[in-house]
Amino acid sequence: MGARKLLLRLPAWFRFTVITLAVFVCGVIASRPATGDNGVPPSADVVAAANAVTAFVEPSATHDPYFNLPSDFAREMGRDPKTVTAPDGTLRVVDAGGGCSGPAGDTEWDFSTACRAHDLGYDLLRYADHKGDPLGPQARKALDDRLTTDLHTQCRLNPRGAEQTCHAVAETYALGLKFNSWRQRWSAPGHEPVVAWAFGSAVVVFLLLARLHGRRREDPSANSLPLVLAHAEQDRYATFLRLFSLALLVVGETVAMLAHLRGFGTSWLWALQAVPLFFFAGGHANLRSWQAHQGGFGCWVSSRTSWLLRPVLAFVLLWVVLFAALNLLDVEVDAYSRLITHPLWFLGVYLLAVAATPAAAWLHEHFRRTAPFVLVLVTLGVEVARTSTDWKTGGYVNLIVGALLMQQIGFFYADGTLATLSRRLLAALGAVTLPALVFFSSYPRSMMVLGVAQICLALLARGRLTAWLDGRFWHVVDFTRRSPMTVYLAYLAGVGALGGLLGLTQAPIWLVLGLVPLILLFHRFERRLVKSTKLAHESHRTRLATAMGVSFGTLGVLGFVVSGFLGDGVLVLLPVDPLQNLIHLLLGWYLIHTARHGSCDTRLPWLLTALACVPPMLALDPTPPVVVLHAVAIGLAVLGAIPRSRPRTPAATAGAATPSPDDLVAAGAPATAPTR
């Protein structure tokens, strides 16, 4: 029984409680910031701050901690420190204009001196962090322990007839304080977007519940076949090319990351740059599938991307939970986290390539020779603009344009044009690329030349490899084709073990061993044959939900590439973190699902979309691109929620849908498919 069916058998209130608690716990753990030593010796000011913290946690009646404060502390932090005598007779330093930051203030037992001294100690932590060299976790732990001792001492000195109650309040203060310090990983305290986190966690719950309760609108009379059967007449060599290039790409990204961790250069890895070949082979699959489809943009793209996002989302959720457990145990696995997510960048770019296929196919039909030439000019123009004006995002633009260029060339392979080229011509072109790679050594020209070399080599090897694929080796290819994320999960287990042996990552051995049963469970999830029907109509909401779903799904995938599962980062102009990435990925998956099954014509998906765009704008200091992006998305969601004058109920028509459960590497549609 699948997990979804098992949850649906439970009472609604129990499902809501379980999902809410799971999201809340993972959210709290995931909100813990990453830590690390910058490797720079502390400055004199930071050393003085560390000495002041020591004086704060070891008070005496003879030494005044005021004289240990850094000389510019008051000016930098805006504080007015002064020395006071605590009830136990020791000298303490407090902020003359400050009060106790505890939830109940000074309380009737007068916790003011201990609380205010602790607050000023936290200011010392902020001061060191502001200087660029944060104090270690032991400093905050010592300050918290000092406050706990002071509170219980005050209960004994000033019980006011309720000493037990005072100790209970003091212990409650201490537990809350230590929990918050643990959650912040004992780093410098600071203002946090608690409202954004709470709202974002609620959005994750709503999206999961909405998808869990979703029902497919199917016509019982529809002849909906398992999707794998729809591609029985497949081009085995094209499938092999996609898998082979994908394997080279993943291995190359992993080796590059491991080399970076060891301090080695990565220029020698150019031979593993199979990006051109991957998108070339992907273009073949996309065009064949689009030609075989009898629907519009929304129906095809939602079907094509749904089977890609589904295992990717399951993969991400699995690792979010695993890294939450590791984070709970304070295991330093940030390097392993980025090792896992970094090779996923091609999935985000591939989503965009799939969404662009209908337009690219039209260009191929009407401007077949002009379209690739224009894309080459755009690539070179963007590179000139990037190098001459320091355009930082130009590299991302060129990556997308280059992928579209290789896909456009793949269309010529799909329609048989490249098959007419002689082997001598292909060999000559391949031979010319070697000196051309030396001459055009800079990106993106070198990548285009490398792409030509890879395509020529692939076409030359087609005959022999096709005969080889008719044998038993095809079973290996077919297994990988049907379960790509399962294979990737097994690959990561091996990489984690190798990285641990080489001392490159700190992934515990129990995590690597624990992946074995998870790999088996994930394979069971991924190999399920899911039936699908094709909608009888495509509304503007279908197209809008598809476009927004692909956009948010791409942001989610690429966001995890930048931030990993534990940190944060900047995706082009958008600051991202794991919670925001998860919301984007969930929202993209949900919108694609609603477009695919026709439920996007109701108001609920658009209300959830508008709701999901709110948390990023609740950050402490949202950047203008973040506000503009999500404000536009909210506006589109509001337009999508406007009721129609004549409501229609989507129906399913007979015939199998065109996607396959391995859209990323699946074979194209039958060769007899009609041409648009």
Image (spheres, rainbow, N blue to C red):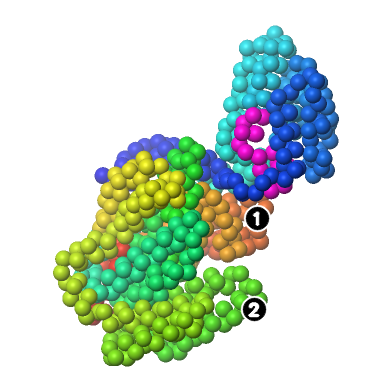
Kindly identify the residue that appears in the image at 60 percent across and 63 percent down.
573
Q: Give the SS element for disc 2.
A: helix
Q: Amino acid at mark 1?
A: Pro
Query: Which residue is most to the top?
Result: 161
Boundaries of the magenta span: 125-143
Closer to viewer: mark 2 or mark 1: 2
- Image location of residue 256, percent across then percent down: 45, 62
- 201 relative to 247, above or below: above
Asked if residue 111 lies left or right of residue 4, the reply is: right
Circle 1 sits on which residue?
622
Q: Is residue 599 inside the magenta stretch? A: no
Which is nearer the eye, 643 or 403? 403
> Magenta part mainly helix, strand or loop?
helix
**What's the amino acid at mark 2?**
Ser
Asked if residue 138 lies in the magenta stretch, the reply is: yes
The residue closer to the viewer here, 492 or 518, is 492
Answer few, some or many: residues within 10 Å of disc 1's Cα (few below 14, many 20 plus, some between 14 and 19). few
Q: Measuring from the top left, give residue 382's x and y in whole percent.
A: 57, 79
Question: Which of 610/456 is in front?
Answer: 456
For marks 2 and 1, the one nearer the N-term is: 2
**Quadrant of the snapshot with the C terminus:** bottom left
Image location of residue 171, percent across then percent down: 61, 21
Residue count near mark 2 (Cα–Cα under 10 Å), binned few <14, some 14–19, many ≥20: few
Quarter holding the N terminus? top left
For residue 159, side relative to residue 265 (left or right): right
Query: Which residue is at a point 66% across and 20% down the rendered structure image?
Result: 149
Whole-Å distance between the Cαs marked 2 and 1? 30 Å
Residue that mark 2 sits on: 388
